[in-house]
Image (cartoon, rainbow, N blue to C red):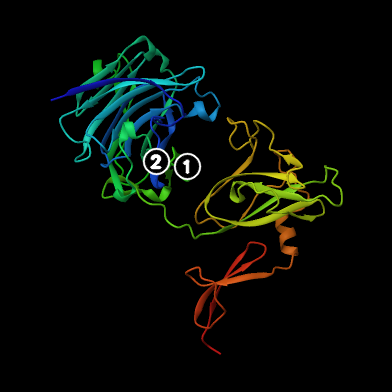
Amino acid sequence: MINRQRRIHIKLIFAGMSLFYSICPIKGQNSTGAEIITKESFLYGRFEVVMQSAESDGIVSSFFLYNIEAGNSCHWPAENNEIDVEMTGNNQQIYFTTHHPAPVQPWYYGENFYAGFSPHDTLHTYIIEWEPGVVRWLVDDQLLYVQNDSVTNDLHYPMAIFMNLWASDAIDWVGVWDPSVMPRQSKYDYVKYYKYTPGNGNIGTNNNFTFEWEDPFTSLDTARWDISDFTKLGNLTTFRKSNVDVENGYLKFTLDEPQPNTEFIPVTFSVNMNEYNLLPSDIVYLNGSFNNWCGNCKPMTNHDGIWSVTLNLHPEKYEFLFTINVWQTIGYAPLGSACDYKPCDEFANYGLYVPAGSAAIVLDTYCWEQCSNCQSTSVTQILQTKEKKLINIYDILGRAVKEENGQILFYLYDDGSVEKKIISNEK
């Protein structure tokens, strides 16, 4: 039996790729979740998934469409569009929702259903049919809900396909998050996309759709999907590539505790100050999210007007800028430029992404408050001319040790480089 539950019509407070509820937030232990997004966006169509959601309070599993370009082009919320299928682990309801643009805050409405089964126990088919002015939701080929109100005409921007698994602190919606339930897993069998071809289709309502492609998840097609990495959603979850897996013909997302991050990657930052009239006593500093914008923690070294410093950073996403004499003068990226890491906020910080397993990274040398690479001398050459000093020796477990025979050791130098040596027992 299909039971229709209460109608939802609430204004949002926060931006989101999926629903962000602001009701009764709580603080809790962080988690690591998973998300993939199609590289392509689609204007109308039939979107089909077979999935099994994750059970337990505080957990959200999803399959939805979202206008990702609205955020990328700073047109959120004026061009906010979203169509959702979501399950929360605290009950057996399925949420069907659309999100709409507004001058200040987007708004959404939809309904939630009990379809006579628990979506957490077995795989079921969920379908979104999106046409101009109409959205339909079907479960196991049964039509459950239609939106054809005048506001549905707001949904006219191309949208990418999203799937994710995350923990929410909105207890009125998902229940109280209990970290002890981790790990939890959601599962996807396939995704199909049908193009909107009114009058020329062969499937779906009024045969308005034509099959375009299917992903059976025999492997993860990185030509089709982007995998979110070091991307935060809400207060409790960071998406990681390591939590996305394909196994036995299923795409699997895992929600679990963050693992200790023991990997360090040398990253070299530099800025060309030759066009800026520095005094002999002036010092250029590097400030960023990696050092909590501390001010004078990371003085840079001057070499013929190019100031540089190398840091050992965990794989992560970072923002940074350059300053003179602690915070006396600040060198932002040009506002709205390609170097403005988050162009939609009020800060014009530079930024970088340090992927796991990366080799040492040498960033472009920016001129003060510029975006173009203006190095007159290779920073790599500058680093090579400096005499390296040994900082410490580590074993394979990351413990500081003394050099001994019969070990695999890692030598960390002051320029950020790491040298691996195998110490032979032979004399």
Which residue is painted at 39% across and 31% down in the image? 18
- The residue positioned farthest toward the top in the image shown: 150
Measured from the top left, where is residue 150 in percent x and y? 37, 9
**Quarter of the C terminus within the rendering:** bottom right
Pointer 1: residues within 10 angstroms few (<14), some, or many (20+)? some
Quickly name the residue at label 1: 231
Of marks 2 and 1, which one's residue comes earlier in the chain?
Answer: 2
User: In 3D space, how far apart are the residues under numbered discs 2 and 1 (Cα atoms)?
Assistant: 9 Å
In terms of image quadrants, where is residue 109?
Answer: top left
Callout 1 secondary element: strand
Q: In this view of the protein, can residue 213 be seen by the observer?
A: no
- Left or right: 278 in relation to 57: right
Q: How many marks?
A: 2
In terms of image quadrants, where is residue 384?
Answer: bottom right
Callout 2 secondary element: strand
Query: Which numbered tag is attached to residue 245?
Result: none
- Left or right: 372 in relation to 111: right
Please name whichever residue, 49 or 403, is drawn nearer the observer in this view of the structure.
Answer: 403
Quickly name the residue at label 2: 35
Given this view, does label 2 or label 1 mark the residue nearer the observer?
1
The amino acid type of the residue labelled 1 equals Thr
Measured from the top left, where is residue 416 in percent x and y? 63, 61
In terms of image quadrants, where is residue 211?
Answer: top left
Q: In this view of the protein, can residue 145 be seen by the observer?
A: yes
Q: Give yes or no for contact between labels 2 and 1 (Cβ–Cβ under 8 Å).
A: yes
